[in-house]
Amino acid sequence: MDWLLGKKKHYQTIDGDYENAENGGSSGMYGSTPSYHSIGDSVDASAVNSPGHDPYGGPPQLHQIQASTASHGDRHDSFIATSGSHSEQRWDHIEDLDQFFTRVYEYHQGGGFSCITLKHFLDLLLFVFIVSFPTFLTQCVDYSLLFKNTNQTVDGVLVEGKLHLTDVVIANCPARMNNFVYIAIAVAVVFWMYRLIRFAHIVTQFRVIRSFYHTALGVSDDQLKNLTWNCIVKKLCSIQASEHKLVINRDEIDELDVYQRILRYENYFVAMINRETLPVYLNIPFMGAFPFFSDGFKLNLEYMLFWGHWSPWEGSYSLKREYKQHRDRELCVAQLRETMLWMGIANIVFMPLIFVYQILYGFFSMADLLKREPGALGTRKYSNYGRMRVRHFNELEHELHQRLNRSYDFAVKYTDQFMSPFLEIVARAVSLPAAALCSVIAITTMWDVDVLEVEHMLTVFSVCGFIVFGCGSFISNENKVFCPDWLMGHIIAQIQYAPPGWKENAHTDEVQQGFFQLFQLRAHLLLEELLSPIITPFIILFDLRPRAHRFVDFFMEYSTTIEGLGDVCTFATMEISKHGDPMFQASVVDPDDSEEAQHPLPTTTRTKQRTERQKCR
């Protein structure tokens, strides 16, 4: 634990708060109110380390900020520093508050140390299964012998009587594998070793967080299931004003301080989609334009724009100096275009391996889902684009999930309002003979199980069953009541997103297509993820790279520096007077006429979010 907690005193060095903290540097920021700087001004920022990231879509793993005692090239695996001895279990002067608060949130949502450790351990085993099982099936099984097309093994051994498992498994099959399989296995082994090292690192970090929950918050793992995240945040804020000073330049912290650190990068994504910088739209013949925002594409964006070594950020807290000076705009554009060029090339090089893995993972995932829900491919869910489009600033994942879940039943009923009569007629016509054939096979099998011995009989039975369930997705409920406007009203009330005309014109094709882009078929989303390794590199090279200037302009225009917090998206600061709807500006109270001058609106966006977070936790 000494290497985690550290022997020396480490201090946060955000925006030059401390030139030399250990030698009595400036401490005038204690208890001060955060001040804001325009990102276009020249703001001196401390040198910071490059952050790491979870390659599977998780939050950044190394939101490091350089301690005052470290050199510019040093890296610290720890996000904890203490002002007292290790035995005192104090939690002062956290070096990396972004990652620390993120881990505290993940610890609560993950159910505690045991659940998180078990999940990551089983993920390692799942990766081994996904790689090894298809390799065994494709390289080590003698299908000619298995299907009884021959009675000899690949080695020429005659097999008589009943087949055994050892008969159909090819002896010494690794020697028969081709070079591509060897390369794929070697890459998978290296990648698995990387994940194993990360597993050990993550477990070590969460051991520290477990200690924090037990000693500072007074919460054991057994109590987590009975406590909402809102309760944990209140405890976090309360200990700042008492014995544990998590943030050294504040006497108090509030909910927004915690949320802005956890969601620093996610707020930029939300803003980019709101300002139409993202996503990318694909024009599909006969189907129109669809937003493309797959998991793999988002991962590439995160690397290029946030946590990559060549991203606009020189650490998790601060943008690079050139992104704060408009005179360096062309330099930033050139650097970002070069980053996108190399990212596109890297995606093309690794495309075959990633594509194969996507197919295998998608196949096993959908097989498990279809086993539980045979008609799942005909159902809908909110896409990545839909989730980001309706997401609030400073809204955590579980809060967004709750809102969308409350709208799900209404969304399903709304989409069911517009079943195609043509497809319904075809589905009824196809499902009837398929159901009849399936029923006959089932009845005859109950009479004599030898029916299944007929060649391909089980295959016919399975296919007919899937046809029946698939056709059911195109047949409307006979008790359906046509009320799209009423349903859309309930959807809007939950997702809190309504372009002009949605509520009054929910029956029109324009509104239907707009909502269907948010609430897409699982089959469409599956296809998007499977094709993502092929599509993503070309989007990066031929769509994003030519308009790299838009991302540079976005960071320069919509970033602000807050002392003690770092650079954040300006929309996430909840300044209603600057970014609010003009309709609400008339209700702003004169600052001289009220003691609530700092919060002029009776119901600001910040207050709305706090109220909402206290509901249904």
Image: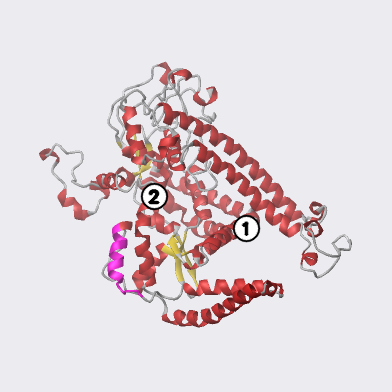
- Residue 168 vs 66, above or below: the answer is below
| Kind of residue indicated by mark 2 | Phe
Q: In the displayed image of the protein, which residue is found farthest to the front?
A: 447
Residue at the spot x=44%, y=36% of the render? Answer: 222
Q: Are marks 1 and 2 in contact (CB under 8 Å)?
A: no
Which picture quadrant has residue 503? bottom left
Dominant secondary structure (helix, strand or loop) of the stretch shown in magenta: helix
Q: Which residues are magenta?
A: 479-493
Q: Position of residue 262 (x, y in %)?
A: 40, 40
- In this rendering, the count of numbered labels is 2
Q: CA distance from mark 1 to mark 2?
A: 38 Å
| Kind of residue indicated by mark 1 | Leu
Q: Position of residue 482 (x, y in %)?
A: 31, 74
Q: Mark 1 or mark 2, which has the lower sequence index?
A: 1
Q: Tag 1's secondary structure?
A: helix
543 or 361: nearer the viewer: 361
Residue at the spot x=60%, y=60% of the render? Answer: 363
Task: Say left or right for 396 vs 432.
Answer: left
Q: Which residue is mark 1?
A: 360
Q: Position of residue 238 (x, y in %)?
A: 31, 30
- Residue 107 numbered tag: none
Circle 2 packing at 10 Å, graded few (<14), some (14-19), many (20+), is some
239 or 391: nearer the viewer: 239
- Residue 612 vs 373, above or below: the answer is above
- Residue 439 vs 375, above or below: the answer is below
303 or 412: nearer the viewer: 412
Task: Say left or right for 513 vs 199.
Answer: left
Q: Which residue is mark 2?
A: 554
Which colour style is shown? secondary structure
